[in-house]
Image (cartoon, helix red, strand yellow):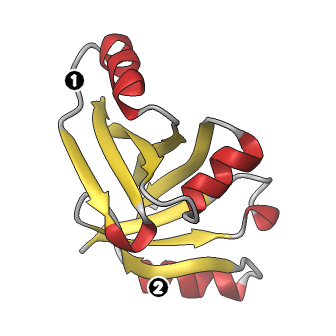
Amino acid sequence: MKKLEHIGIAVEDLEAAEKIFGEVLGSPSYKREEVMGEAVLTSFFQAGESKVELLVPTSPDSAIARHLQNRGAGLHHVAFLVDDLEAELARLTEKGYRVVTGPKPGADGKRIAFLHPSDTAKVLVELCADA
């Protein structure tokens, strides 16, 4: 693991959340990006060496839409940057961690995979590597 890459926050109103995090972090979102395969619109903020990713669903049957319906807005995942996504997944699955989804293309020029939250202290963990 190289570093904490970003935290993902599920939101219901992207513009309102962008205003809040722009004020809190002292700078506006540097990028909006739609990830078609995830049916989500993302907005990124730089926060020191890490980022904050806001996520709003673009489809009512997306994972983020289900998260909002079941848990409401708030923390969705914690993402760690790795050098070699496949090697990290192999290392972790050998230790018994289950992969929920991935590797697959993600936002911000990354390839991503998610570990099952039941295996990671009830926190959805994303591993990401530069594409």
Q: Measuring 69% from the left and 88% from the top, which residue is drawn there?
A: 94
Would you say 32 lies left or right of 66 here?
left
Alpha-carbon span between mark 1 and mark 2: 35 Å
SS type, badge 1 = loop
Looking at the image, tell me whether mark 1 or mark 2 is earlier in sequence order.
1
**Residue 18 figure quarter:** top left
Tell me the tag on residue 42.
none
Instruction: Report the residue marked by disc 1.
Output: 28
- Which one is in front in this view, the residue at disc 1 or the one at disc 2? 1
Determine crowd level at label 1: few under 14, some 14-19, many 20+ residues with C-alpha closer than 10 A: some
Residue lying at the far front of the rendered structure: 60
Q: Measuring 46% from the left and 62% from the top, which residue is drawn there?
A: 1
The amino acid type, in three-letter code, at marker 2 is Ala
**Residue 73 figure quarter:** top right
- Pick the front one: 91 or 106: 106
Picture coordinates of residue 40 (x, y %)? Answer: 41, 57
The amino acid type, in three-letter code, at marker 1 is Pro
SS type, badge 2 = helix
The answer to whether marks 1 and 2 mark residues whose Cβ atoms lie closer than 8 Å is no
Q: Is residue 11 above or below residue 114?
A: above
Q: In this view, does 21 lie above or below 102?
A: above
**Residue 60 figure quarter:** bottom right
Picture coordinates of residue 14 (x, y %)? Answer: 39, 34
Would you say 84 lies left or right of 74 here?
left
Q: Measuring 34% from the left and 48% from the top, which residue is drawn there?
A: 42
Q: Is residue 113 above or below residue 96?
A: above
Determine crowd level at label 2: few under 14, some 14-19, many 20+ residues with C-alpha closer than 10 A: few
Q: Measuring 41% from the left and 50% from the top, which residue is drawn there?
A: 3
Picture coordinates of residue 63 (x, y %)? Answer: 59, 62
- Pick the front one: 95 or 33: 33
- Pick the front one: 98 or 101: 101
Instruction: Report the residue marked by disc 2.
Output: 87
